[in-house]
Image (tube, rainbow, N blue to C red):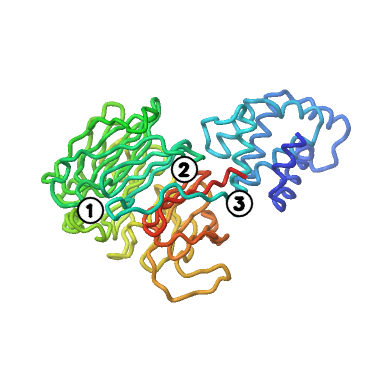
Amino acid sequence: MAEERQTVYEEGGSSTAARRRGLGLSLAVSTGEAPSSRRRSSVAVWPEHFVESVAVQVAVDAALSEGRLAAGPAIANFFQVYSTWRQISHSEMLWQDLTNRVWSHHHRHFPSWRAEFIQLHRTAQNFRMHRSVHSRLLAPTYPARSCCCLSISDAYLAAGFLDGNVCVFTLPNGAPIANFSCHPSRDRLGRFSQCVSGLAFLSNPNRVVFAYRDGDVHVGLLNDGPLGTSHRAHAGDLVVDGPLLDFTGNDQCWVGLFAGAPGRSWHVWDANTEQLIYVGGSLTDAGALMGWHMLTDFGAPVVGRVRLAGPGMAVGCSSSRIQVMDLENPGFVINELVLQQGELAVDSVDATSEGRIVYVDLNGLAKVCRVPVLDEVCSFDALRRDMQGQHHGEVARVVACMNWGYVICFSSWAGVWDSHTGEFLYRFRERIGHVVAAVVNNRNVAAWSDDSGLHLWDFGAM
């Protein structure tokens, strides 16, 4: 417990409030008076499963009221109330439940769930305090190798390029493990019809699914040698559907957003059978002509984005609308937010699996909303704030990405904000130039700059 207390007390201020909550638990069993020795003894011999339940509730309450970093100090102080409870603090079931409920983390990468919880706490604290290790994975190359999109999981990072190639790296070390090449006869209509529109990782077995601008969808097996092999799961039809703007997915389903044909914006595939199960929707109908321009002009405005946001939900964005679609009932729009025409910077949209979305308007104002209700959690200026809070007049493109607790925005510089309060935390020390794509998970941030290549920041290494 000494090691654990030292770890979770790193947060400082939150530990005081958490200590009061933990120590106050013994007082809560009385009627507000100082508990007698008999009462203290009866509390001290609570059944093990009951103590575990109360401990988890104390940590969850602390996380909900003061943020997830408060859960560690709360649970450490809880087990200091009675010495008879301390043995229970070694229960693996307790730490598994805490990890699942506090960090929404269901896969263990360390020998024990207690170690998993501590590592997640340390990593989140590193995000908060700006402690990371920076490395460059790829140098910038000729324009045809410019990166179009990035995808990240707990174990892998994938980059899709303008020439149709996909490079996959392991995390956290950033070692390349596979490269998937496009087929030489892929230039169907326009010089950019073969560029990668989106990527996603699948498990059991470990695979990467990637889609091209012309609508083709491929699945490649990882850990199968440096020259990866893939099969085509879906053959695109540009004439019928138009260009594929964006693509994402998981082990249950894949989602693509198209622009070019009325009433065919959304495409949904069953990930297990690789079969197309839904086509419909008019989200991108207004940008159909612009979608066709993306086949010949890589610098054309982004028409639409799609992200997974919470269990069974996908969020699609155009320059004037945000739609939340029920993936368990494809085609049913749960909610829609209508913005002023052209207000949304479509290439500045991201979402988390915990049901939050961040988007940036053309003035650099970032908003974090809950899905599916799309009510605002916080907002902040992502474009003009510097470290001292000064404002400048430059106009820059913003690329935003978000994990469980933080929003990272890249413009002429990179900054980090708290996604629950909108508080500006710090800016990155590294100046990497113009960022085209960025992605983040709970431990790593990755970004591609045409000026300096592919960069990786590891917040769990320290």
Task: Identify residue type, mark 2.
Answer: Glu
| Contact check, label 2 and label 1, Cβ < 8 Å | no
Is any part of residue 286 visible from this angle?
no
Task: Identify residue type, mark 1.
Answer: Thr
Q: What is the secondary structure assignment of the residue under circle 2?
A: loop
For disc 1, the marked residue is 284
Q: Nearer the viewer, residue 180 or 207?
A: 180
Mark 3–mark 2 distance (CA, rounded to whole Å): 24 Å
Q: Nearer the viewer, residue 277 or 248?
A: 248
Relative to 449, does residue 462 appear above or below in the rendering? above
Relative to 197, does residue 201 appear above or below in the rendering? above
Q: Residue at x 18, y 56 (%)?
A: 296
Front label number (3 vs 2): 3
Task: Identify residue type, mark 3.
Answer: Arg
Mark 3–mark 1 distance (CA, rounded to whole Å): 41 Å
Can you name the residue that lies furthest to the bottom here? 393
Q: Residue at x 36, y 31 (%)?
A: 207
For disc 2, the marked residue is 354
Which tag, 3 or 2, sits closer to the chain's start?
3
